[in-house]
Amino acid sequence: MRLADFDFDLPEELIATRPVRPRPAARLLHAEGGTIRDRHVRDLPAILRPGDRLVINNTRVIPARLSGARLRDTRDGSGRAQVEITLIAPEGDTRWRVLARPLRKLMPGDRVVFDAGLEAVVAARGDEDAVLAFALAGDDFEAALARAGRMPLPPYIAARRAPDARDLEDYQTVFARHAGAVAAPTASLHFDADLMAALRAAGVAFSEVTLHVGAGTFLPVKVEDVTRHRMHAEWGEVSAQAADEINATRASGGRVIAVGTTALRLIESAAADGTIRPWRGETDIFIYPGYSFRVTDGLMTNFHLPRSTLMMLVSALMGMETIRRIYAHAIAERYRFFSYGDSSLLIPERD
């Protein structure tokens, strides 16, 4: 299975840099039963069935982008340099693995000072990232980060414009509860309180799980044989309540539909033996064509980057030829792509 099998040509003007408002006004490509229909997210109460269950990721994105000054004692006064830091994963109470620009400016022992009283010491530096040990922890750290940080927009948006105050709301879901993600579960960005109320009134249930999305979601696949790719691990949790709800839905004949690839990867990780169980830990599950889905009956997801692991995941769910047809339709009909773009509801045909 070659990386080129998951490539396609995407017109640059289809890359969305702002979401539509209100959130459910986004378009929705509904693929089910061999047909493709052009709908809107607000149509979900009419599309889904009573007894279906949507599994949502309640992670909360932290303002993980920081501008700071590296300070190093030098005789010639050259010890000060500006650096850009992106938090990518916690490593204990005060330490974070980070991306840095320029990384070569950091050496173990250097101090890095940010706004709002936030500062850190460089604990380690590797070839691709570094580890910072912050002076604050817990609520104090979160409060300082909220004042000093910026939302970590995906590279394909950040390359076109800088983050601003609108992104603090736009890049956060309405059910964000547990801080720790450095990227949003973007399919969930299309929901608001009114849509959720309408879905519940239509007999659709919700279960919440937590997967703290890492920056690895944006890293390119570098191997031509995709089966040799290794995913970055991300921390997640499926509670006993969520597991019981999902199992009850399956037992009663309802469909389990993941809202976003992060929720899908988590519930599949928690169902290693075919039955979902309470689960907590790190997952590096990699889903590509040939994977046998254990508990997922459908997926709501935005449109993904060419040659990405997420293209491989949706190809595994729907079949490679079907996904090619879906994406060709989306491009021809001018759907908006990626994190701030439109969405799709993918329901595969089952034997």
Image: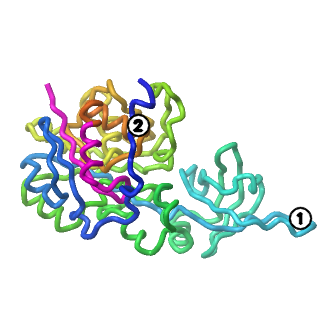
- Where's the C terminus, which quadrant? top left
Q: Quadrant of residue 67?
A: bottom right
Residue 132 location in percent, x, y?
A: 66, 56
Query: What residue is rendered at 31% in x and 60% in y?
Result: 189
Q: Relative to 350, is 280 on the left or the right? A: right
The residue pinned by badge 1 equals 74
* Image marks 2 and 1: residues in contact by CB distance under 8 Å: no
Farthest right residue? Answer: 75
Q: Relative to 163, is 32 on the left or the right? A: left
**Colour approach in the figure:** rainbow
Q: Quadrant of residue 278?
A: top left
The residue pinned by badge 2 equals 7
Residue 342 location in percent, x, y?
A: 28, 56
First along the sequence among labels 2 and 1: 2
Is 70 or 3 nearer to us in this picture?
3
Residue 221 location in percent, x, y?
A: 50, 36
Residue 59 visible in image: no
Q: Is residue 337 magenta?
A: yes
Is 72 or 23 nearer to us in this picture?
23
Bounds of the magenta segment: 325-351
What amino acid type is highlighted by mark number 1? Thr
